[in-house]
Image (tube, rainbow, N blue to C red):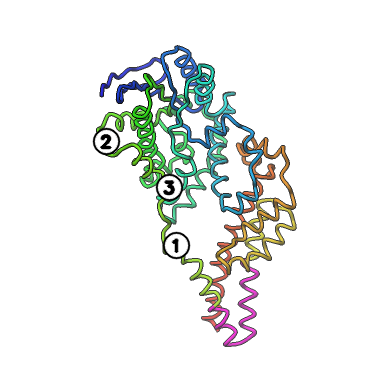
Amino acid sequence: MTLPSTTGADEPRFEVSLNGTKITLLGTAHVSRVSAQVVHDLLASGEFDAVAVELCPSRHQAIVDPDALSRMNLFAVLRQGMAPMVAASLALGAYQQRLAEQFGIEPGAEMRAAINQAQAAHLPVLLIDREVGVTLKRCYRNVPWWQRMGLFGGLLASVVSREKISEEEIERLKSGDILESSFNEFAAESGSLYEPLINERDAYMAARLRQEATNNDYQHILAVVGAGHLAGLRDTLTAESAEPPAQTLERLDQLPPPTRWLKFIPWVIVALILTGFAIGFSRNPDLGWQLVADWVLINGSLAGLGAIIAAAHPLTVVIAALAAPLTSLNPTIGVGFVAAGAEAWLRKPTVGDFSTLRHDTAHLGGWWKNRISRVLLVFILTTLGSAIGTYAAGFRIAERLLGS
């Protein structure tokens, strides 16, 4: 392996040789005119016979087929429990879009430049990043359960923030990763989050480059990656690896199993609530009905409040309030699914909603304006309201039983 290091005047870069294939790692900013121009100029030079990009198949699809969102099956998203993941992905995209709108350049312009120039030169495009959904799930599973709300909170904070960022500061984002930046300071302070968000992706992209260099006859690959990954990729590629690339990829693509005891908590709560009802009725029917009323009013009102905050249809608010006390006693179905399904049926999203979804969600008010993102808000906020209501009603029931 030869390790000739080079330094460009415009963008940081590093060269490495793997199995006879020369790879130039180019560090870019994901929102930068300079980065996009450098990528275009390098590929136009004719020096490379392949280009690798820091994209997964789904992110690549979003670039080459921007109308794909218009074909999204919203009910399938709700049914498969993917609403939080879709909302998180939109929040990530919103962060990039908010930065990009300040400078009139689309997010990921350097990736678009790489794809377009590769197509014009008939060069293969190698997707080397891990699926963003797998990364987000591994982030979620890797942090303690009490910090998980902070993940989504960090994403929402990046959308709410109206702080203007100078173009010089944008260029300095080369020292960090756009996903890490989306979580503000959370990633830097949490090793459990930083590992799947940054280090694992460094290892994944290095394994993909090793795989391409081993399995194909490329002479010179240009790898376009966020500059925050440049040091990690350099260290990984220059170190001896005993693990075959395919094995590394399989390991990093696996989702860690959910914590088993967390799966039983909803059932334990249901058992405790039902036991409280039984004790109340055994002591006095009036007490039993009072406990039931507490459960219905507290749980239902907080779920309904969540729907109101999401600016749901009035009938959706009623449905959420009526469904929450029942769905909370059945962990196999959540009030979020019921309420979001009702909202999607009552206010059917239009083609225009799909086409403007990414633009609308780049601004806080747009989440309520767009019918699709509002359905996601209904799902999340009614679920949160019912969860809070479950614990609040549970404590109220316990208080009445202990005081009677």
* 150, above or below 282, in the image: above
* Residue at horizontal 38 percent and vertical 40 percent from the top: 249
Give the residue pinned by disc 1: 262
Give the residue pinned by disc 2: 241
| Range drawn in magenta | 275-299
Give the residue pinned by disc 3: 138
Whichever of callouts 2 and 1 sits on the residue coming sooner in the sequence is 2
**Disc 2 to disc 3, C-alpha distance:** 23 Å
Image quadrant in which you'd find residue 196: top left
Whichever of callouts 2 and 3 sits on the residue coming sooner in the sequence is 3
Callout 2 amino acid: Ser
Question: Residue 203 at what x, y percent from top left?
Answer: 35, 37
**Disc 2 to disc 1, C-alpha distance:** 36 Å
* Residue at horizontal 47 percent and vertical 41 percent from the top: 183
* Mark 2 vs mark 3: in front: 2
Which residue is farthest top? 45
**Disc 1 to disc 3, C-alpha distance:** 16 Å
* 297, above or below 3, in the image: below
| Label 3: element kind | helix
